[in-house]
Amino acid sequence: MTAAAAAAAPTAAPIDPSGAVRPGEELNVPAVDAWLKALVPALQGTPEITQYSGGASNWTYRLKYPNRDLILRRPPAGTKAKSAHDMAREFKVQQALKPVYPAVPDMVGLCQDPSVIGTDFYVMERIEGIIPRKHMPRGLTLDKARTRQLCLNVIDKLVELHSVDAQAVGLTSLGKGPGYPKRQIEGWSDRYEKARTWNVLGFKYVRDWLKANTPADVATCIIHNDWRFDNVVLDSNDPTRVIGVLDWEMATLGDPLMDLGNALAYWIEADDNFMMQATRRQPTHLPGMLRRQEVVEYYLDRMKLKTDNWTFYEVYGIFRLAVIIQQIYYRYHHKQTRNPAFKNFWVLANYLGLRCERLVRTKGRR
């Protein structure tokens, strides 16, 4: 086989692993097992319980039965934003989308009985494949052409979602209608104030600029609201092909360009500065990946949309990420979570806020 043929041939790659359950985040296995077997009598044996480390919000566990491989999602302990961590909503969104958007996992069951583990949770089928995180799995190397194809396929899967008919799948009540950008700016600004700790800045200049430059909705569609490479699952035999989309916690009806702005807040390029590289959690730095501006142009062309105010969506996405990070740090700061990965999140929140301010001052419209 030639080198070119070897590069093009599909190669089975390592599957995304789960690990030991973090201290303080253990599941009541007998209670979950009993509830599941009442729902799915064919389940056999006792599940092997492991936990995924990638999520910083909801806690995600693998329940590996001898005859079934399942995933359980539950909220974290501690104070939660009013609209966040709604397991019933996340379950029902995926259940409605599955018939028309096959990348959604198969739902198994929703539990809203607090006597089981003290909180709502749901269980779904595990999609076996590769989850591309900060680095591609050891042993998996894609050439530039295949990396570009992976990148385009991930964007195309977002375009496919934004093209779903919300009315046809019964999700018109998922959002509040027109005015989504305005509600988001007001909401995330308010959340930042509530999650502030003594060691983060206020970023009033950025929040005021976003409020003053908020555009009208370009469209209203189903949006994922947390679109990242580490929320997609790739075919292990063809790692350019997306076979699953995960983490529907924040899905809603809204403006598709707001969703794209959110996605690009995580998009770190190979020549970005040191601090941006430190925030990278997906392999967008690899040769063949589109640059942020190329992503915007490709997406707008596929969706047949236009904007003359992209800086707004870019700043919004980064500021929203700063708020999410600060909300997570707030839980750590107040000892509501023990995950040591969150210890320095306040530094990231400050950096992202300052990045927003630089963008506003250099590219923003006043």
Image (cartoon, helix red, strand yellow):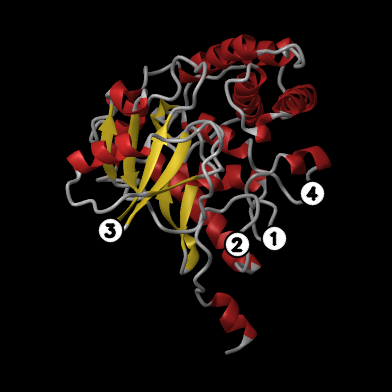
Say which label, 4 or 3, has the lower sequence index.
Answer: 3
Q: Nearer the viewer, residue 69 or 325?
A: 69
Secondary structure type for disc 2 = helix
Q: State how far apart marks 1 and 2 are (Cα).
A: 7 Å
Residue 147's tag is 2
Q: State how far apart marks 3 and 1 are (Cα).
A: 40 Å
Say which label, 2 or 4, has the lower sequence index.
Answer: 2
Secondary structure type for disc 1 = loop
- Which one is closest to the eye, mark 4 or mark 3? 3
Question: Label 1, on which residue?
Answer: 287
Q: State how far apart marks 4 and 1 are (Cα).
A: 11 Å
Residue drawn at the location 42% of the way across and 35% of the way down: 27
Question: Label 4, on which residue?
Answer: 271
Residue drawn at the location 79% of the way across and 22% of the way down: 361
Q: Position of residue 329 (x, y in %)?
A: 65, 23
Could you tell me if the residues under marks 3 and 1 are in contact, i.e. CB atoms within 8 Å?
A: no
Q: The N terminus lies in which quarter of the figure? A: bottom right
Q: Amino acid at mark 3?
A: Asn
Residue drawn at the location 53% of the way across and 64% of the way down: 14
Q: Position of residue 154 (x, y in %)?
A: 50, 51
> Is residue 246 visible to us here?
no
Q: State how far apart marks 2 and 3 are (Cα).
A: 35 Å
Say which label, 1 or 2, has the lower sequence index.
Answer: 2
Say which label, 4 or 1, has the lower sequence index.
Answer: 4
Location of residue 92 by image quarter? top left
Secondary structure type for disc 3 = loop
Q: Is residue 210 above or below residue 111?
A: above
Q: State how far apart marks 2 and 4 are (Cα).
A: 17 Å
Question: Label 3, on which residue?
Answer: 67
Could you tell me if the residues under marks 2 and 3 are in contact, i.e. CB atoms within 8 Å?
A: no
